[in-house]
Image (cartoon, grey):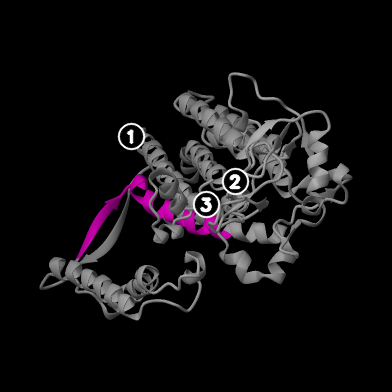
Amino acid sequence: MYPNLYYVLKDWFGVKWEALQLLWTFGVMVALSFLVAALVIAAELKRKERMGLLLATEEMITVGKPASIAELLTNFIFGFLFGFKILGLFFSKPEMMSAQEFIFSREGSLLGGLLGGLALAGMKWYEKNKQQLKEPETRVIRIWPHDRVGDIVVLGLLFGILGAKLFDNFEHWDDFVAHPLQRLFSQSGLTFYGGLIVAAIAICWYAYKKNIKLKHLMDAAAPALMIAYALGRIGCQVSGDGDWGIYNSAYVSDSLGNVRLAKAGEFEEGLKKNATYYLQGAFIEDNKIVYVTDRTYSSLDKVPRSSAVAPSFLPVWMFAYTYPQNVNKDGRLMPGIADEHNRVLPSPVFPTPLYETLICLFLFGVLWLFRKKIKAPFLMFGIYLMMNGAERFSIEMMRVNRQYASAGYSLTQAEMIAIILIISGLVLSVYAKLSYKKENAGS
């Protein structure tokens, strides 16, 4: 596993750049997914603009003004924070403190902060000074919907992370109340549907304010959302953020996480050997109880499992994986590993993030292939909602999440929202077909 880019370079090239501990693998993949989504949605918006479905709007801007005190001060503050922490990470970080602990501590480099603040403020002053006119001018500019993709992506990123954190902490309310700062600033703990819902609300509001037809924006966003999710799940798989599935009882693993086929009764023996992990979420290390997970069960018989042997033409890790050195620090200690992330699951699990990546890449291909044939507004987005809901509901059957009793059934938060998405997508698709048929009845 590669919790952050420090582990990538250490494993691939043998170099140890501690500053790279700040670049979490999951965060890097999320950034990449937003970049790819931006390219996809921009391409779709341009296509709809050429079709005359989306139009440009005019806005008034003032050019030629010098940099204001507020702009210089804002840039100085951001530059100071960057230099105080990032430069401080290279020159001021205590040896025994991790990069993440350093970022959220009071430690830092005052000189680095001043240099960063002055540099960023100076750049803003130079930029504005170069464009300054004797008399500032007010101009009218035309802005097309695809020109606003940057704003849409930033809104999606900010409100997506906010929503993902909020929904995750709602799902783990007791842990949040007990450790609020740790839950808020941890690199793990994100709920996709929470991010999707909150980001969608923010983007819809933005589209309304900018006179972008929501029905065409939503259709353009459908394939972009699907590929963004597929790429984001790569980050879950590579970092080992806890989104794995139930245990595969066809395999067992050694202390380093190497997987092999289990003999009769061997998987159950492994459960008994690590009973404190499954029943209490802890290991006894150096005569102390060390808690490593909140996934516990009332008895070993209740530990969720299924048996599936990998076909000979596929690698075993696609069916049974132990997530060594995972970002969650979940599992038992790995002998001989002195890194901060040095734990491995005691039994192999199904790598469900990998399955979601493969499924969603396929679904993206389907949406992209048929996008030009789908004429009815809202239909593309309705199909996306049904695909997304069905995919997530099926995967949830292989994952272990907190369940809620509802109408005699036990469902996870994601399963509940997935059902709502499927129903919403079906209703939206029917509405789209009927509305399009009605509008074109006379033509």
Alpha-carbon distance for marks 1 and 2? 50 Å
| Sequence-earlier tag: 3 or 1 | 3
Q: Is residue 64 left or right of residue 271?
A: left
- Give the residue number, with chain letter if any, for mark 2: 324
Q: Residues within 10 Å of mark 1 (few under 14, many from 20)?
A: few
What's the residue type where badge 2 is placed? Pro
- Give the residue number, with chain letter if any, for mark 3: 3
What is the x, y in percent for residue 264?
82, 28
| Sequence-earlier tag: 1 or 2 | 1
Front disc: 1 or 2: 2
What is the x, y in percent for residue 194?
62, 53
Residue found 43% across the figure and 49% down from its top: 10
What is the x, y in percent for residue 173?
73, 64
Q: Is residue 441 magenta?
A: no
Q: Provide the major secondary structure of the magenta segment.
A: helix
Residue situated furthest left in the rendering? 134
- Does dot 3 land on a helix, a strand or a loop? loop
Q: Is residue 175 above or below residue 247?
A: below
Residue found 45% across the figure and 73% down from its top: 94
What is the x, y in percent for residue 106?
47, 79
Alpha-carbon distance for marks 3 and 1? 43 Å
Q: Is residue 96 above or below residue 48?
A: below
**Front residue of this view, candidates 171 and 286:** 286
Q: Does residue 15 show up?
A: yes
Q: Is residue 148 magenta?
A: yes
- Give the residue number, with chain letter if any, for mark 1: 50
- Does dot 2 land on a helix, a strand or a loop? loop
| Sequence-earlier tag: 3 or 2 | 3
